[in-house]
Amino acid sequence: EVLQAREFIESAVAEKAASLASAADIEAMDAVLSRMESDVHPGQSTLAIDRAFHTTVAAILDNSVIERVVGELFDQRMT
């Protein structure tokens, strides 16, 4: 159920974020992606960087509730 909820919510978030993203938002996503590329996979920081990417995308909507929900759904995947 958590994965289904993530798929539904994050799809809507990504779609909206794509229409709102500024150059600074894209730079923030690129920075996280650069961290992913340079990280040893799998490593201790892999999940933290992955989570950071998802919450960075959610942050584009400028809605702290959505950003928190995306982060919490990501965290629930791990429990």
Image (cartoon, rainbow, N blue to C red):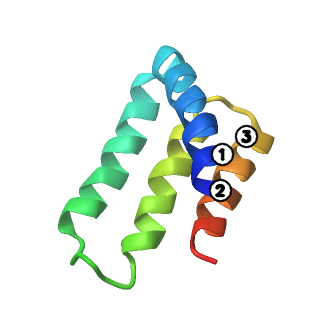
Task: Give residue 26's mark.
Answer: none
Task: Report the number of discs.
Answer: 3
Which comes before the other along the chain, label 3 or label 1?
1
Mark 3 is surrounded, within 10 Å at the Cα level, by few (under 14), some (14 to 19) or many (20 or more) other residues, namely: some
Q: Secondary structure at mark 2?
A: helix
Q: Position of residue 73 (x, y in %)?
A: 66, 57
Task: Give residue 5's mark.
Answer: 1
Q: Position of residue 15 (x, y in %)?
A: 51, 22
Rendering quarter of residue 76: bottom right
The residue that mark 2 highlights is: 2
Residue at left 50%, top 60%? 51
31 over 48 or under it: above or below: above
User: Dividing the image into 4 quarters, which one contains the N terminus?
Assistant: bottom right
Which residue is nearer to you in this view: 29 or 23? 29
Distance between the Cα atoms at labels 3 and 2?
A: 15 Å
Q: Secondary structure at mark 3?
A: helix
Q: What is the three-letter code of the residue carrying label 3?
A: Ile
Give the left or right position of residue 78, taking residue 68 as reference: left
Q: What is the three-letter code of the residue carrying label 2?
A: Val
Which residue is nearer to you in this view: 68 or 25? 68
Rendering quarter of residue 61: top right
Residue at left 36%, top 73%? 46
Q: Secondary structure at mark 1?
A: helix
Do the numbered discs 3 and 1 sit on residues whose CB atoms are within 8 Å? no
Q: What is the three-letter code of the residue carrying label 1?
A: Ala
The residue that mark 3 highlights is: 66
